[in-house]
Amino acid sequence: MWQRFLRNLFYKTWRPYYLLVWSLFLSTSLYADGIVSGFLSQLESQNKKYEHYYFKVKQKKLALKKLKDLTQLELSPVEYESIQTNTPARYLNLLSKNICTDIDLMKNGLLKNRNGTLNEIIVVGSVGNEKIEFITTIYNFISFHEKRACFKNKDMALLFSPENLKSTLKTLSVPDGQKQCEAFHHKTIQEGYLPYLCGIRESLTKNTNHPFLSKPILKKEVSKYHRSFLEYFCQNPDSNKNFCANYITEGVWKKALTRDESFPDLNYRCLNLYNKSKLTTAELQKCATMIQQNPDYCVFENNNRFPHLRPGENCKNLSDNLFKMRLKRDYQDCPNRVNNSVFTNVHRIVQHFSKAKLEYDQDQCIFQVHHSVFSLLKKLKREQSWPFTICYMSKITKEEKCHPYIPGKGNQDPSSEESIIGKSLYSLIGAPRDTQCLYINQDDYRPYLLKYKNGCFITYDKNNCSIENCSKKIIFNGKEIKGISFKGVSQFDYFHNSFKNEKNSLQSLLIESLKLQKKEILNLTQLKSFYQLHKNGVVHGIACLEDLIPHIYQGLNLNQCTPTPIIVDHVIKEPFSLSVLLAIDNLHSPRTISWKRLFNAVRNYRNLHPLKLWSLNGLY
Amino acid sequence: MVSIKIICLLLTPIWSKTDLPRFATKQLVDNIRFISSDSKTTYYVAPRSGLNVSTNYTVQNILKGTPLDDFTIHHAKGSKYVAIAQQKNFHQYFSPFREKDIYVSIIGSLKATKIDTGLFPKIHPQLEWLSYLKLKENKIVFYNLKSAQPLFNIPLPNNSPLRILGVQRIVLNNRKVLYSVRNEEDSPLLNIFDRGDSKNTTLTIYNKFQRIELCENGTSNFLGLFGLDPQINKSQIFSISFLKNEFIEKSLYLSEQNDLGQMKCNTGQNDHLYFIKKYNDGVDIAQLNINNSDLKRISHTKNAERLINLDGNLLTQIDGVAYVIKGISNVKDSDNLSN
């Protein structure tokens, strides 16, 4: 018993440090004495014994030719002992519970002997009363038993064939709730999934070949969710509590790693934290642990690349808010770099109803936000209502010509600043028709370098450039081009401010362009009912910042209001708490705001509105 | 009897709002931006013309505007000036960081002079100074209302507009200004700026989950520290002074709750300070006696999250309705607005 305990202890904790322990012990007197040294020498002697025995049996050259004549076939005691010594302890509990489980463990490469993964093994075959010890391949051993007793093993193997792997994994989704999770863990083991699941896990984590699934298949069919699931499951086959702790008690951050769909709130938070554009799973896990253990981190979370309003909720509250968040948010926007927050709110609504996925790029962020609004107008052929234009004096007509453009770095988009400037240069100075300019920070522009000698460049001062007020230079083939001006102020009716302009409000554009419907939300009952009826609906509005976040932004004067576009995402806790995303908030950091506050904030804005409009509506 | 009790219980939330008198004016309250304590001067928004001022039985337009613009009036009890902030296209351009046009005017005068663009104008009544924030330039600007001259600037230690939102300041004397700002680590700093040598000195660095408020009334100054939920659960109010360059705090109030604060100490009754306190049943206005630290709840709305000092009258706004907490509730008979 104590030997098994020691062996388990050794394999669980020390084996990775075997050499280190070995050399350390060699240099100390400890090695000579005590239980550990006894165990190490026992291990060594077992392995030597196995080697010796293996060659001894092999020399007999008793290759099994007539497998079908055997009445019984089992592992030789020496082989069994070697497997017990070399197999990771977590899989040993299953060993020899019944031969069919052993077969599945072998088949999936989980059992190891002195030589590593089982290939040739020492077996004892029975023909009548006679017992013969010989060496055979693992394939023969498996085949023998599958033909005689383990018929069901083939069914299980079929579930994990390349064709069925994806659908089988799909059925393995950990349910919410402690009891349900523990029951799920128990059932998964009882039904014999463990060898197959952990075989995949071993292959993925160690990047080794899987016995019957190719690497591309594994890469394609095993999602991020199931990679984490396999890790938690195969680390804890004998403890459903430890397994479920990863799903139940860790909150949304760690849980994010265990969900099938990507969890953008963690991904984008961690990208910012690591200042990278891509993260490894290990970095993501480390980041999730950090957030989990430091709930205060989120309050003053600073995102220099995608700035937003602070302070926000702590990570614990945020975890509760994000858990049920409805708004699609598999991208990152930059509220504080967009002057007028109506654009950010509309961008978020457009993205919610869109299937396209935005690229993660801080340079393109401003463009992406404005592009969403521009695309609504373009779809309705109302580009003339777009406020931003690039203008120049036409040499032919002697009249000012203006083209709408989308502010920000937009690369190849035909409505981007780079393209519209190129188009203007064609008309103005006869530059090539397909001229594309390069948006570049003035400090990075080095005219003496060859690459800047030819072509078109738009230079700007990164530290002193807002959408409406930015001194830019247009340089074509090394010469500054005058006569092109940027016009427009980023103002727009969010809801209509006059009956005359009702059709051109941003809400109307959303409804018309995305073919949505509108429902006025006047009270909490209507809000809840909207969420129930329209699972993909969005509730948006305008409310006074002074009432939404009075602890941060105070209303000092009579009828003072700083109108802010909002998205009311869901009811967090009955009866009154809501998850609300202000347009100036980080997309991944909704706030907890009571219905009372929200109502007050909408009502106070209504008092100031030229048409006394109620500004909280559901779109679906 | 039982049914009466049930009806009473059901009506409690409604009554809780109506135990305060509504602010009654001749004009629509929504349009009013300022009424002087004697009710003789009223500034109100006239959607078609801009900002109007009514005084001495006359109504005149003081600043032109469109229905899409908005105005706020900034005043401090004891000052004869007002600062007017005009936000053009208020209903089309939403940003807390957008600078407004700042005008100054003598109360009741029909002349308003534009001095700059900026945010959060504040009048310091003791010296008749005005201060406001410049986001792009990252500074607090001080302006002398009497001489109509800019005075000096306090450069802020970091350039994040997000940190500037919480900047508070009070004028200690014509040489020194006490102000708060968050540093790079987001901790609130209490700084003193000496005009003489343009030197900034940090007096205290507080916990980053605390919020600083400063209040001045010409004779006394107060410091409020309020925790941010749920990291810190503590609120403190101190009377502050400087004796031989030594910063002295005298504690007036301590609570284990995070009050909303919004301290008002300049209401004409300088022995009391008012703030929004968290009670077990909601938030309401508390009156703190600065001499003996006595605390009294003076509203029972459970929902008063704004505290407005309208030239000494204390108001709150709940669900779009203005209620009077302290002062004159009915100015219908005394204001001079045309109907």
Image (cartoon, coloured by chain):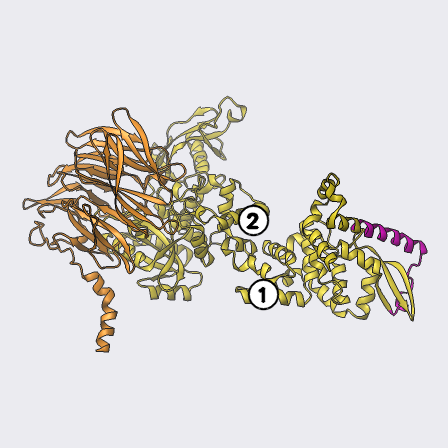
Chain colours: A yellow, B orange
Examine the rendering and report whether any part of residue A432 can be seen.
yes
Disc number placed over residue A285 in the picture, else none = 2
**Furthest-left residue in view?**
B57
Mark 2 surroundings: few (<14), some (14-19) or many (≥20) residues within 10 A: some
The residue located at (90%, 61%) in the rendering is A133
Residue A275 lies, with reference to residue A222, above or below; the image says above
Q: Is residue B334 left or right of residue A501?
A: left
**Furthest-top residue in view?**
A448
The alpha-carbon separation of the residues under discs 1 and 2 comes to 23 Å
Mark 1 surroundings: few (<14), some (14-19) or many (≥20) residues within 10 A: many
Disc number placed over residue A54 in the picture, else none = none
Q: Find the magenta span and give its range.
A: A43-71
Which amino acid, mark 1?
Glu
The residue where tag 1 is placed is A182
Question: Disc 1 sits on a residue from what chain?
Answer: A
Quadrant position of the N terminus of chain A in the picture: bottom right
The residue located at (34%, 46%) in the rendering is A385
For the residue pair A409 and B283, the one nearer the viewer reads as: B283
Residue A230 in the image: x percent, y percent?
63, 57
> Which of pointers 1 and 2 indicates the residue nearer the eye?
1
> Residue A128 appears in which quarter of the rendering?
bottom right
> Residue A489 appears in which quarter of the rendering?
top left
Residue B313 lies, with reference to residue A243, above or below; the image says above
Indicate yes or no whether the magenta region holds residue B225. Answer: no
Reading the chain from its start, which is encountered first: label 1 or label 2? 1
Q: Are marks 1 and 2 in contact (CB under 8 Å)?
A: no
